[in-house]
Structures are given as structure tokens and as C-alpha cells.
Image: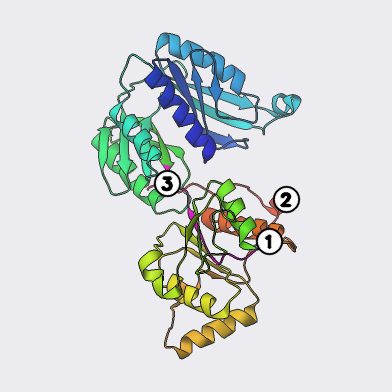
Amino acid sequence: MREHEAVLHALADAHKAGRNGALATVVQIKGSAYRREGAKMFIDETGHRVGLISGGCLEADVAETARAVMEQNKRMIKRYELGEDLVWGLGLGCPGTVDIYIEPVSAETELHPAFALWLESLRKGRAAALCTVLPVTENDGGSADRRMFLSEDGYTVGCLGHEGVNRTVAAWANTLFQDPSPKSASRSITLEDGTTVNVFIDISVPAPTVMIFGAGHDAVPVARLSASLGFPTTVIDPRAGYNTVDRFPQATRIVAEPSQYHEKVMIDSRTYVIIMNHHLERDREALKYVLSTPAPYVGLLGPRSRRNRIMEALEKEGCFFGEHQLARLCNPIGLDIGAESAEEISVSILAEIIAMRSGHQGGLLRDKSSIHRSVVTAR
């Protein structure tokens, strides 16, 4: 998340300062690769690079290619066949085929409106998609104008050269926006006349917010790790002496009693909640409030017997929850990694949140047939 932002900031700064550059983006992977679609690197005219598109084996060559892209002011696709001998001989990366889209960013030319809107949306933390018709071959520069911006609410700017392609890609983007952790990808779209158009959709959604109910000692490493992962983090606790900037320097702090949750605590479909008050009544009130929101993940610290007591108390109050609400409740909280210390438990909790958001179950990668989730595409 932070690397992505650094690349785009470097691009914007170079353009504003009048320096030419090139943006390299991984647009398609076949087989294994160190990075996935959407990984980026920006190279300016001085050769300065920001970002990674591989484990280190491709960057120098891509930077050299980017120099030619800048000089000719012509975009291109470059394919790398990363065989076992090449990759492991360098001691980096994974074998597979990688397609990298390299486009010039000229200081003398205004950014394409769709591209500029996409950058602005990312800067403001808004969900957005940038759709680009890709060159067919390395020598095909194609048309840099065939680009379209789409916002989560349906606002579009630009055109992909064909109304049918526009509709297909818009439906695809809408599907991706519903995914908690959408992945950028490319696909081929066949037109009525039989011609094929290759489109890359660069999708970005805001980082999930992690909301922690409870400012006890074990919440400190959870908030610290969450913030270090780039997740905006909020801590809610009525005890002003615990919920302090010294204890939670990287988090937003809300000092609130349970009766104030509706007024002070805003939760949406990208908010991942951890309840760890170590106080039965506050945990009960937090759970009652959170389960009524669209939060996709509600982690409750403590054993199942404690959760059952809380749920029984809520039922006596007349609070009943449907299956879809209870399906979001995780208890005991965290992945099973044998965590004991507060720091280890924080790793377990955040790992579970990452897995839930990405649609994974956790577990050992050596037991998996594939380490990456399949990308959803429109039909």
C-alpha cells in the first residue's frame, strides 16, 4: 500500500517539477512471479527509480527500456520469460511470464484526463479504476487515448474506443469494487467483428480501517502493527487515561461510552473491528453495536464460553442477530500460530484480518496448490 502511494507521488512530483519519466506496470502474469498485476515502478529522466516490479531481477532492464520510452515518447509492452535458470541464477523472483506496460509521462504534456482523475482519487483515498487498452505487441505503440476512469459510484471519463468494450469493462469494474480486496488484472475482449482488444484494469480501493474497542495493554501492539501495515487505525475506549496519544501515537482515538457509539463511531463495509475491552459489559455493548453495522469482520477476544455468555445476555435484552451477521463474528480471534505474548497475538489477529479481506483461509502455503486467489472478471 505505501509502496504504491510512493510510486504515484514520485510520478506526480516529477511531472509538476517538469521532469520526464516513465511508469512501468505489471499487467499480466502467467505462472509464478514475485509481484502480481498492478505492481509499479516509476523511473524519471535522471534514472531515479521508485517501486518494485519483481524481486530485483527486472528493474535494471526495465529502467533501461524506460529511457527509450521517454526518448521516443511511445508506450510499449515488454514481455519477460523468466525461466528457472535465469531466475534462480540471479537468486531472485519466481519462474513465469511477466508482461510489463511502460508508458511515458512527459513533463510537456498534460496527463490524460482519465489518468489524472485516477491519481487524484488515489490521493484522496477513494475507490477508483483506470482501464487501459494495451498494445498488442512490443512494437505496437497503440493509442494512448484509449483510456477510461471509473469511480465506485459509476462516474466515468474517457473511452476505450468501442462502446461495447466500455460496457463490458464497466461491468467488470463494478464487480471488482464489491470485492473487499480487488486485484488488478488484464483480459481479452472479443468484438462483434472478431477483433480482440486487450484491456488492463488497475483497480484501487481505500485501505481497510481497523477499529479496536479497548485501550488495554494488549491493544497497544495491535494498533502499532495495524498502523505499520498501512491500515488507518482507530481505538475506542471511555478511559481517557488509557486511550492516550502516548500509547497510541499512530491511531485515531475516540473516548466514548457505549451509549455514544451511534454518535461518535462510524463503521462501513471496509471497517474491520476488534473487540478487546477485557470488560464484559463494554464488550457486550460493542458487539451489539458492531453486529448491526456492515463491518465485514468482527473479532471478539476471549474464549467461546465468554462469547456464549455475551450472546445469551444480548438475547435476554431482546437482541437477536441473523446468520449473515453472526457469520462475520470471529471468536476465538486470530489465526492458529501458537501465539502467547501480546505481540504474537497481534500478529495472529492482523493475519486473520488480512486473510479474511483477501478471501483466504490461512494455513501453510506449502499445503496450497496455488498461493494467489483467482481474479474475478466480468462475463
Residue at far front of view: 241
Label 1 residue SS: helix
Image coordinates for residue 169, horizontal then vertical, percent: 33, 41
The mark closer to the camera, 1 or 3, is: 1
Left or right placement of residue 338 versus residue 184 in this view = right
Dot 3 or dot 2: first in sequence order is 3
Image coordinates for residue 15, horizontal then vertical, percent: 39, 20
Label 3 residue SS: loop
Q: Residue at 58%, 79% (x, y): give it.
A: 307
* Marks 3 & 2, CB-CB < 8 Å contact: no
Question: Which residue position holds label 2?
Answer: 366
Q: Residue at 29%, 49% (x, y): give it.
A: 153
Question: Which residue position holds label 1?
Answer: 345
**For the residue marked with disc 2, what is the amino acid?**
Arg
The answer to whether 354 is drawn above or below residue 199 in the figure is below
The mark closer to the camera, 3 or 2, is: 3
Camera sees residue 250: yes
Q: Nearer the viewer, residue 372 or 67?
A: 67
**For the residue marked with disc 3, what is the amino acid?**
Val
Label drawn at residue 205? 3
Image coordinates for residue 152, horizontal then vertical, percent: 33, 48
Q: Nearer the viewer, residue 283 or 153?
A: 283
**For the residue marked with disc 1, what is the amino acid?**
Ile
- By what rule are the colours in the image chosen? rainbow
Q: Which of 161 and 156 is in front in this view?
A: 156
